[in-house]
Amino acid sequence: MLIIRIIPGENIDRALKRYRYKVKSTKQNRNLKQNQEFTKKSQKKRLELAKAIYQNEYHKNKEE
């Protein structure tokens, strides 16, 4: 749960902007989307492995 303290006399738009930034920085939306459907551990490992392979090849090609 995110808590945003509103300073007396502060504009509500500024407080909403701070709230949006905090949600984005804590990756709360991504977690909510991931929890909408169950993914097996093997599926997660497969996705992480594919991502690692992609990043490795990307950096290899960048060096050449």
Image (tube, rainbow, N blue to C red):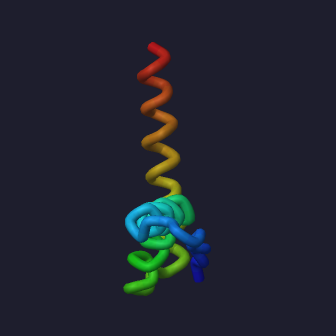
Kindly tell me whether residue 29 is visible in this rendering: yes
Residue at (42%, 70%) from the top-left corner?
12
Name the spot of residue 38 as percent of width and height, x first: 44, 86
Q: Camera-side residue: 31 or 51?
A: 31
Q: How many marks?
A: 0
Kindly tell me whether residue 46 is visible in this rendering: no
Q: Camera-side residue: 18 or 13?
A: 13
Name the spot of residue 34 as percent of width and height, x first: 43, 76
Residue at (56%, 65%) from the top-left corner?
26
Rendered-image quadrant of the N terminus:
bottom right
The picture quadrant where one finds residue 57 is: top left
Q: Camera-side residue: 26 or 8?
A: 8
Residue at (42%, 23%) from the top-left corner?
61
Task: Specify whether 26 is left or right of 46.
Answer: right
- Residue sitting farthest toward the front: 9
Rendered-image quadrant of the C terminus:
top left
Name the spot of residue 6 as percent of width and height, x first: 56, 73
Name the spot of residue 45 as percent of width and height, x first: 54, 66
Relative to 54, say whether 10 is above or below: below
Relative to 53, say whether 43 is above or below: below
- Residue sitting farthest toward the top: 64
Residue at (50%, 72%) from the top-left corner?
28
Task: Specify whether 8 is left or right of 34.
Answer: right
Q: Camera-side residue: 9 or 46?
A: 9
